[in-house]
Image: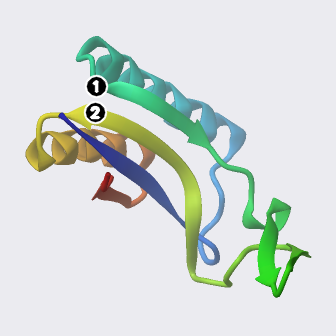
Amino acid sequence: MTQYLLSVVTPAEGGEPPTPDELTAIMSRVEAVQTRVRQAGAWVFAGGLAAPSSATVLRPKGDEVLLVDGPFAEGKEYLGGLSVIDVADLDEALRWGREFVAAIGLPIEVRPFEW
């Protein structure tokens, strides 16, 4: 079995965020996919992330570590959430990725862990 990271690619700009009712419907669909992942025995971990503006970046500077508010890099997209699954192969990971795309309506990046 191989573990894969399924990353929710969230646009930083453009488009309106979902309304509370739309978000409730999205989360209901996500929970349904997560339930199917658990039932298939592929579940490892999942979670949503706060906005990039809530981030603190730790940067090395000589023997010190500097703390910087805000995201590591400015971009058109950011990591909005993630799931880690343990599946037989890339095809199975992509199948679950497709289900998350359908549930969330945003791109999903599928990437294997290297050990």
Disc number placed over residue 19 in the picture, else none: none
Q: Residue at x 28, y 46 (%)?
A: 97
Relative to 47, say whether 113 is above or below.
Answer: below
Please, which colouring scheme is shown? Answer: rainbow
Disc number placed over residue 42 in the picture, else none: 1
Determine which quarter of the picture holds residue 67: bottom right
Q: Residue at x 14, y 49 (%)?
A: 90
In the displayed structure image, the side of residue 103 where residue 87 appears, left or right: left
Query: Distance from label 2 to label 1 (Cα)?
Result: 5 Å
Q: Nearer the viewer, residue 64 or 104?
A: 64
Label pair 2/1, CB-CB below 8 angstroms:
yes
In the displayed structure image, the side of residue 24 where residue 53 appears, left or right: right
Tag 2's secondary structure? strand
Identity of the amino acid at label 1?
Ala
Q: Nearer the viewer, residue 114 or 72?
A: 114
Relative to 32, say whether 108 is above or below.
Answer: below
Residue 95 placement (x, y as % from top left): 17, 41
Give the crowd class for mark 2: few <14, some 14-19, many >=20 residues within 10 Å. Answer: many
Residue 24 placement (x, y as % from top left): 61, 31
In the displayed structure image, the side of residue 31 where residue 111 appears, left or right: left
Q: Nearer the viewer, residue 95 or 42?
A: 42
Tag 1's secondary structure? loop
Q: Residue at x 30, y 56 (%)?
A: 114
In the displayed structure image, the side of residue 52 where residue 42 appears, left or right: left
Name the residue tied to disc 2.
86
Determine which quarter of the picture holds residue 39: top left
Q: Residue at x 51, y 35 (%)?
A: 46
Give the crowd class for mark 1: few <14, some 14-19, many >=20 residues within 10 Å. Answer: many
Task: Looking at this view, name the residue that lies furthest to the top.
Answer: 39
Q: What quarter of the picture does the N terminus occupy?
A: top left
Identity of the amino acid at label 2?
Asp
Residue 49 placement (x, y as % from top left): 66, 49
